[in-house]
Amino acid sequence: MIVNCGISALRRTRNGIGTVKKTLVKADKIRLKNEFDQIRRDGSKLVGSRMLAVYAPAPDGKLRCGVVCGKKYSLLAVERNRARRLLWESFRLLKDRIGVCHLLLIPRWKMADAKRQEATREMLQLLVKAGLIPEELAGSPPEC
């Protein structure tokens, strides 16, 4: 049985203990060009070895994320799509820990060799450094 709780859903297991199902919904994604431009203009940049993260205050009061991966990253669409998937999956796993902001993620060339756990770990480190995730929640990244 799934009970809708807004962004996440509460799933009841056999023993009656509920778990939170982490999902991405359309409202979690930044899609419009003017929103991307606003984040780049007003945001602060964090640089990691595998990704670049730009975060800005959220005018709508919601946590939202966008991923940009152009041909400068790779001419092969399959490599660009894999980088996008890694970043979206890392965001999905960490979004319940992140404070309210608009986040823009851009992969760097080392993302091509990264595993999902490495990408999630690096995103966690960058967001803790920015103060978007409190230190006490940064203990260990989710390893699903």
Image (spheres, rainbow, N blue to C red):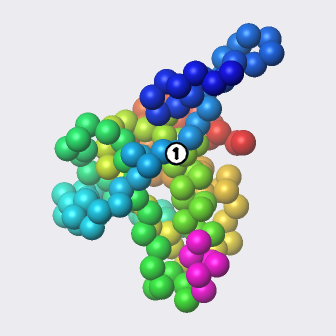
Question: What is the quadrant of the N terminus in the image?
Answer: top right
In the image, the segment drawn in magenta is: 76-81
Find residue 141 and report its horizontal and vertical position in percent. 62, 40
Q: Residue at x 36, y 41 (%)?
A: 63
**What type of secondary structure mainly makes up the magenta span?**
helix
Would residue 131 be seen by someone viewing this image from the given angle?
no
Asked if 66 appears above or below 107 in the picture, the reply is above
Let me know if residue 13 is in the magenta part. Answer: no
Find residue 41 and report its horizontal and vertical position in percent. 19, 64
Amino acid found under the numbered disc labelled 1: Leu
Left or right: residue 78 versus residue 134 is right
**How many numbered circles does the render carry?**
1
Would residue 120 be seen by someone viewing this image from the given angle?
yes
Name the residue beneath numbered marker 1: 24
Q: Residues within 10 Å of mark 1 (few under 14, many from 20)?
A: some
| Residue placed furthest toward the right | 14
Question: What is the quadrant of the C terminus in the image?
Answer: top right
In front of the other: 12 or 76: 12
Q: Secondary structure at mark 1?
A: loop
| Residue placed furthest toward the bottom | 75
Find residue 14 and report its horizontal and vertical position in percent. 80, 15
Q: Residue at x 56, y 40 (%)?
A: 23
Left or right: residue 21 versus residue 143 is left
Q: Residue at x 22, y 64 (%)?
A: 34
Q: Residue at x 55, y 66 (%)?
A: 84
The quarter holding residue 57 reads top left
Left or right: residue 77 versus residue 116 is left
Find residue 115 and report its horizontal and vertical position in percent. 70, 61
Asked if 116 appears above or below 124 in the picture, the reply is below
